[in-house]
Image: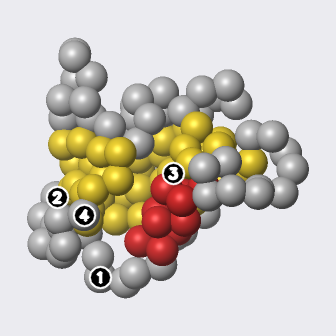
Amino acid sequence: MKLTRKSTNETVTLSDGFLWSDEFDWNGIEQIIEPALDGTPIIQEGKWKSGRPISLTADKNMAWLKRHVVSRLKEWSLLQDEFFTLKFEYLHDAREFDVKFRHKDTAIEAQPVKEIPSVSEDEYYNVTLRFVELSDAN
């Protein structure tokens, strides 16, 4: 799995052990149902053009990232008006998504695997990454 910053073409390799935990949770249709005066339902629907959440979670025993990679991702997450490509690189799944970091929720969560302060940029972290899919990213 790779995350590429579109403006500079820089790429960060992510572990293939991440799980897209909310892949099937999103409903791209919003609906409001209200009764008319005679009790007939008035249904209004709208379809999202984009905005699907992509939450990449990891079991505590897999999908670790080194501290320097987490630092780079954190730096990228704090850049406004930046767009990224998230590319899956599985044999059965080579999808690509245009994304931004999702700040509505916490964009990045990271805890040291050893649960002690880091002594090196090569220390491993257990990470959760949250993105929002865009249909027309720059």
Residue at the image position 48 percent from the left and 41 percent from the top: 56
Report, in whole angstroms, how far the alpha carbon at label 1 lies from the one at label 3.
18 Å
For label 3, the residue is 129
Dots 4, 3 in contact, CB < 8 A: no
Q: Position of residue 17 (x, y in %)?
A: 48, 27
Report, in whole angstroms, how far the alpha carbon at label 4 lies from the one at label 3.
18 Å
Report, in whole angstroms, how far the alpha carbon at label 4 lies from the one at label 1.
16 Å
Work out whether 16 lies above or below 40.
above
Work out whether 114 lies above or below 76.
above
Residue at the image position 73 percent from the left and 50 percent from the top: 111
Label drawn at residue 135: 2
Dots 2, 4 in contact, CB < 8 A: no
Q: Position of residue 16 (x, y in %)?
A: 41, 29
Numbered disc in front, either 4 or 3: 4
Specify which label sits upstream in the sequence, 4 or 3: 4
Amino acid at circle 3: Leu
Amino acid at circle 4: Glu
